[in-house]
Amino acid sequence: MNKVFRNTSWPRARLALALLAAVGAPAMAEVVGTVSAPSFEFVVNYTDAVGAARTWTGGANIDSSYFTLNQTTGAWDLTRDWTASIGGGLVTLALKADGTDGNLDPFVNYSFQATNIGGAPVTFQTTTSAPILGGVAGPNQVRASIAYALTDPTGNGATLTPLPAVAQDGNNGPETQILRLSNSASPTLPGVNNASWVNAGVDVGQSYTKVGFPTGFYSDADGFIAGPVASGSTSWNWMQTRTRFTLTGSGDSVGISGFAEILPVPEPGEWAMMSVGLGLIGVVAARRRTVGKTPQA
């Protein structure tokens, strides 16, 4: 490495590196900063002990004290499990979350477990939201994935059925997890029903049924596709996953893990400049190899 710095070709290398720095490579830099902890919201619809329909909404108790910023990964880690017993013990919901990235790579990553210990099917909904540091403007790509681990303790069949929470992307009908983006410039999180949310087009997770033990596994992923472009000079400043499904009863449970990501796509001119910069680095490397050769006698 020291030989490189002493080589007379180093000014050319600095020029090539300067060109790359001027162009910029989206999502390559990892800069951990002071950002807001991820936000979680839970909604559960269930039937109580006397057959009445009930709705429970929670999430206010999941405050910032539950999260710590992991300086190694740049992610928000949940410091302890958060559990709520709902409807007089008819429903139990446990959350285990990795949170969201605290650096320049905008993604949401979460996992939780839901158990229906009553007899009637129960609807679960969880929302995970996060700011996009610096925003994403212009062309972009999105991707998403989800995995289920469905358990049927009584052997009479356990079924997870997705329910649409907002307008779906239209690919496969209702799907369990949707990714939404918002161009809201507000420093506070837009409400889940805020008009600025736009479906990103990577809904994942169809129905799944498992009968008996062992636990059945299902996974679904939508690879990188062209994402929606914010109108005008605005950018996407918030991202949100919403997971909504009905789970059969008699102790049936499901563990869910989800992921969603949005990345900027460099303009064609930027790709050209990056190619020039990489080409100059190649020329410098070739020049170094030539200079370093010793003439043969």
Image (cartoon, rainbow, N blue to C red):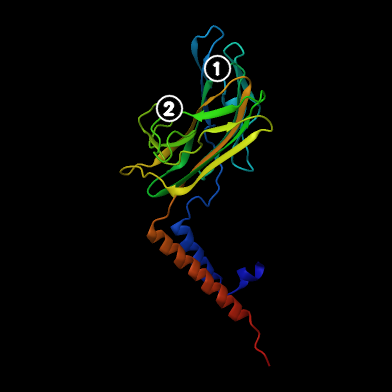
Q: Residue furthest bottom?
A: 297
Q: Position of residue 30 (x, y in %)?
A: 55, 48
Q: Earlier in the sequence, mark 2 or mark 1?
A: 1
The residue beneath circle 1 is 120
Does the image show residue 292? yes
Q: Position of residue 152 (x, y in %)?
A: 64, 27
Q: Where is 118 relative to 4, above or below?
A: above
Q: Which three-letter amino acid code belongs to the residue tagged 2?
A: Val
- Residue marked by disc 2: 192
Question: Which sits in the foreground, 207 or 179?
Answer: 207
Image coordinates for residue 215, horizontal then vertical, percent: 66, 33
At horizontal 63% and vertical 35% (from top left) the residue drawn is: 216
Tag 2 secondary structure:
loop
* Label 1 Cα crowd, 10 Å radius (few <14 / some 14-19 / many 20+): some
Q: Dividing the image into 4 quarters, which one contains the C terminus?
A: bottom right
Can you tell which quarter of the image residue 294 is in?
Answer: bottom right
